[in-house]
Image (cartoon, grey):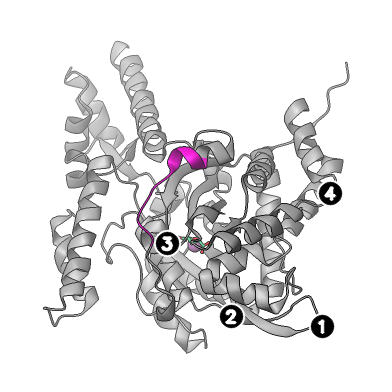
Amino acid sequence: MHTPLFVSKDEIRSRFSRAMSVMYQQEVPQYGALLSLVHDINAEVLDADPALKKALQQQSELNRLDVERHGAIRVGSPAELKGIAQIFAVMGMYPVGYYDLSVAGVPVHSTAFRPVDDAALQINPFRVFTSLLRLELIEDDSLREQAAAILSKRNIFPPGLLELAAHAQAVGGLTEQQLDEFVAAATEIFCWHREATVDHETYRKLHDAHRLVADVVCFKGPHINHLTPRTLDIDAAQAAMPQRGIPAKELIEGPPRRQHPILLRQTSFKALEEEIEFTGQGQAGSHTARFGEIEQRGVALTQEGRALYDSLLAQVRDAEQQGADTSSYTERLQHAFRQFPDDLYAMYEGGLAFFRFQIQDEKAWQQQLASGRSWDLPEWVKRGAVALVPITYEDFLPVSAAGIFQSNLGDAEQKSYVSQAARSEFEASLGRPVLDEIELYRVAQARSEHALHQRFLTESAT
Ligand code: OOG
Ligand code: NI
């Protein structure tokens, strides 16, 4: 029997991620500068901290560091979202989480396509934050209809690509021969088009409704709007950006600097003003959408940990709005987050964060076994036999995403929509439910706990 040899989804994803990075370096040279900055800083951090280097190695985090990045795209219709989902599935990327950005005055809602199992995440955790335009949030009826009509005419998928994705899904994968064609076509969806699909007047009207509306509606496809490498020290990266002539956003979004990082911290450089051509009499104009971003990732939080994070961040933001305090934002952030323990055991014991478990000390482990004590993981951790390994947060933060959006829209662009999460509408547009990120972390922790318990049972029986 003839068995076709399929390329692994991980390999397809890695190839696609690399192709996207190469394309974006050509399109936005500052992104290339950002990559080399992050590369240098990561090397310095690892040189200066051999213990961290060893820990990252043990957690299999070091291998993925150099290839690790996320991107962001914005699509215009349910059909586009479904097609994108089909293509990402071929690469082992599935929709995780629902983000309502109308709270931030941005007329989109989103999910993140990413790998979900431990092995795939270790090889290449490439994620794409994917937003769907919410036309219903455009107030003006005729403008809304015009936008819908423009979108209904475009086809963002290169010929044959959706068919190839459907074929891969039906037979179980892509062959080596199909790989290049697939990766090239998938990358092409997200390239920049200098030529708008509308005239200047239409662009202006859509832009007045919201800059994001113009960005989604007026072009041939959903150009990648940023790519984000992962740094081990975002404060150093933030400080180095202006030194290398990269205009940094003022504040780092997310939690403060800590001994044990939690969730996600992000900063970006401002979007470029790029020349475009409108239809009509070859009118020229400009559009700003594309930028670069850097992120530092920490441990994933449980529901309780996340609630504490959200409340502390809200405290800082409320104080900010009242303007009563003269200390800086960073100081206030540091101060509020003293209520969030910066100690792995305290986070574990308090049920605030997710961990994997490794034998820390073989001797202490053997002693525990010899003592005939029953299985009690927290106790074994406390006694130093078992080490806590933080599970990396693989997702996004809506408040931070809003901050990144805002820094690129400028102050003049503060729109307010009544906050209206519409998760079920989003899932209907996507054609499937999104996965629950907290559940994924919970299962990863439980799996690790189970494996160690099995080992306990085997070894205590002999
Ligand atoms: C997405 C912004 C969200 C992040 O890192 O939080 C994002 C966008 O600008 O389309 O990428
Ligand atoms: Ni981003």
Looking at the image, residue 345 lies above or below residue 155: above
Give me the disc on residue 401.
3
In this image, 173 relative to 237: left or right?
Answer: right
Q: Which residue is mark 2?
A: 272
> Is label 1 or label 2 in front?
1
- At label 1, the amino acid type is Gln
Does dot 1 land on a helix, a strand or a loop?
loop
Judge by depth and name the residue closer to the eye, 263 or 153.
153
Q: Which residues are magenta?
A: 417-426
Tell which circle, 3 or 1, labels the residue nearer the N-terminal end.
Answer: 1
- At label 4, the amino acid type is Glu
Q: Residue 421: within the magenta?
A: yes
On the question of residue 47 being in view, the answer is no
Question: What residue is shown at x 20% (from left), y 50% (from top)?
Answer: 308
Looking at the image, residue 26 lies above or below residue 371: below
Tell which circle, 4 or 1, labels the residue nearer the N-terminal end.
Answer: 4
Which residue ends up furthest to the top in the rendered image? 461
Tell which circle, 3 or 4, labels the residue nearer the N-terminal end.
Answer: 4
Q: Report whether the residue tagged 3 is closer than 8 Å to ligand 1.
A: yes
How far apart are the alpha carbons under marks 2 and 3? 18 Å
Mark 4 closeness class: few <14, some 14–19, many ≥20 residues within 10 Å: few
Q: Which residue is mark 1?
A: 281
